[in-house]
Image (cartoon, rainbow, N blue to C red):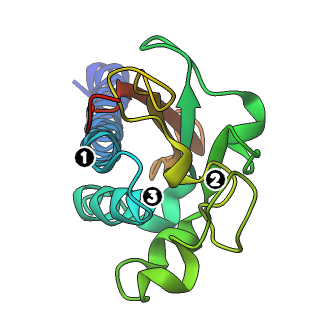
Amino acid sequence: MIIEAAIVLPVFFVFVFLVIEGAMLFSDWQGLNNGLFSAARTATVYGNDNLTDYQTLVNFKRDFSAVNIDQLQGFSVFKATSATATITAGCKTGSSIGVCNFYSANDIKLVPSTPPTLYFGTCTANGVGGGKDASWCPETRKVAVAGANGPPDYVGVWAKIRHNQPTKIFGAFKDIEQTIVIKIEPQKLT
């Protein structure tokens, strides 16, 4: 009986820890997924409103609340070229003029408690203005069906979180990244 227990118990405990860590990892992935879908929908609806990125972050933070915000490694709103586009490596670590706006966990902690115009909505062109959203200024995003302000841009949202594994049996942490790209909803004909 003792020999059988010595053989079965380690296997049993590894299986239990695998289930626990898998469930916690899935919970973090689902929280990230919920936050990103909310952020992507917000970015497509607000289009070229000067507070698009602010509203995007507010909704991401609200629907990401199942995950500890300190696990967030980065969040980016980027200009995509198609529905299947991927984010550039540079936009995963910082903003790039005319391409993306990068936000850290500390930036997201500021919303919605900080007045939006303190950090957002002050740009008028890509790279012009002092706001956190100035690199890919929301006001420059195309939202018309046709003409100079169309067709609508694709907007992507990307985020990366670090899931810390409590038992550390399968490693200390696992990074989870996800990207969602949606076409901005048209707001006018031309």
Query: What secondary structure is found at the residue carrying circle 1?
Result: helix
Between discs 1 and 3, the one toward the N terminus: 1
CA–CA distance between discs 1 and 3?
A: 12 Å
Q: Nearer the viewer, residue 29 or 100?
A: 100
- The disc labelled 2 sits on which kind of residue? Phe
Quarter of the rendering occupied by the C terminus = top left
User: Residue 34, position in %: x, y?
Assistant: 24, 43
Q: CA distance from mark 2 to mark 1?
A: 17 Å
Q: Nearer the viewer, mark 3 or mark 2?
A: 3
Callout 2 secondary element: strand
Nearest to viewer (mark 1 / mark 3): 3
Asked whether the residues under the numbered discs 1 and 3 touch, taking CB atoms below 8 Å apart as contact, a structural biologist would say no
Residue sitting at 34 percent across and 38 percent down? 29
Residue, disc 3: 53
Horizontally, is 183 left or right of 124 in the view? left
Residue, x 48% and y 47% (percent of image)? 165
Residue type, numbered disc 1: Ser
What residue type is disc 3 on? Answer: Asp
